Image (cartoon, rainbow, N blue to C red):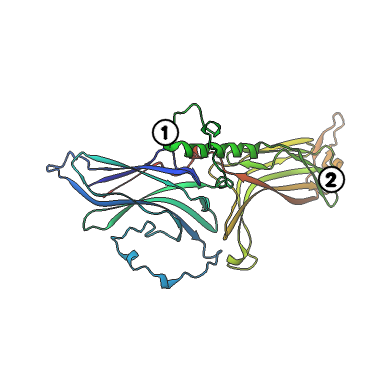
Amino acid sequence: MIEVLAKLGRGPVFLAGEVLECVITFTNPLSASSTSASSEMLAWASAQIHCQFHASENRVALPPSDGSKHDVQAENETVFVPNRGERGQCILSTPPKILFCDLRLDPGESKSYSYCETLPVDGPPSFRGQSVKYVYKLTIGCQRVNSPIKLLRVPFRVLVLHGLKDYQFPQDEAVAPSNPFLEEEEGLKKDSRLADLATELLMVATSRRSLHLYNISNTRGKVGTFCIFKTVYKIGEDVIGTFNFSEGDIPCLQFSVSLQTEESIQEEFQRRRGQPVSFTVHARHQESCLHTAQSSFSLPIPLSSTPGFTTNIVSLKWRLHFEFVTSGESAGTCLVRGNQSEAVTWTGVEQMEVDTFSWDLPIKVLPTNPILASYVSQFSSTNSITI
């Protein structure tokens, strides 16, 4: 028996273009119940990164696959096929790398190997939507002599930040983005600078503030104004906005704000022409606001959510969805005076006419520092199997 342990040193979230490093340890454990310990032998081990694509048959019409390119070797259990048994199709993969050949481990002995690979910059981000899924995995294949291959799959998350692949690193190391408080190995300098550069680009893109004012009105008149200071965010931030109803002609009884993603299939891949777009609500604020002059909301963008992106099959966009309930009568009729002689009591009316309307405000959501996103990732940095 051999234990195989794969550990991602920095966490399970990466930016496209970064170097993924995984330490893979093979151990022949000592068993207290075993009376005759013996050496174990592995013929070889190899590792490869791939991205699996899966589409809902009810929503997405993919072109038929080419059956003439049937790979006979893929059916052989002694051939390393990283996505064997996986749903969907492999749309992206890196060249396989051999970790070792003919490894012998004595009882209690272990050997570790480091796998490093640059994540492709032209791939999609990790995404689990209602219509499609993009899932990244590092697959390690191991084989005993005259035995089937065993696969250890290490899932991880990929964030895509456009503009990184066009950046040319400075020749002068002194002017390159770096962290002066960390001692870095020479081989990790470029990867670390890439993460620092991404953080800097995100900071610049999401720190620009300018006042955006919108008039809220329906067919009967003005309800109020809405104010927001920026429309570009990164995951993990809060979307903050304020309302001013003091200058409105129509009383607003209630409002709600939803932070939503809009998942739409490109027209040529739609199962039915004009099929509806899929919406997902990530946060929601609802408030009763009759006789309220000003109000505000704060909606967090989950670190586990996917920033906006577009591929040849699907696009994901973010928006704020507003719903307003306004009075169909004047403000004075929202209260009635009681029939008490000594004191005046005002109570709400039992029934009143209302109007409802909605409004959508597009916003842009970008990735964040992958280390920060690793704290809430559903994936584990350590995975293992026994062969």
Q: Reply above or below: 20 against 96.
A: above
Disc 2, SS: strand
Residue assigned mark 2: 222
Q: Nearer the viewer, residue 304 or 307?
A: 307
Q: Earlier in the sequence, mark 1 or mark 2?
A: 1
Q: Quadrant of residue 67?
A: bottom left
Disc 1, SS: loop
- Residue 142 in the image, given as x and y percentages of width and height: 29, 52
Residue 69 in sight from this viewpoint = yes
Which residue: 74% across, 37% down?
A: 210
Q: What type is the residue that disc 2 sits on? A: Lys
Judged from this view, the residue extending furthest toward the top is 181
Image mark count: 2
Q: What type is the residue that disc 1 sits on? A: Glu
The crowd level at tag 1 (other Cα within 10 Å; few <14, some 14-19, many 20+) is few
Q: Is residue 326 left or right of residue 193?
A: right
Q: Is residue 55 left or right of residue 99?
A: right
Which residue: 53% across, 31% down?
A: 174
Whether residues under marks 1 and 2 lie with C-beta atoms below 8 angstroms apart, the answer is: no
Which residue: 44% across, 29% down?
A: 183
- Residue 306 in the image, given as x and y percentages of width and height: 56, 47
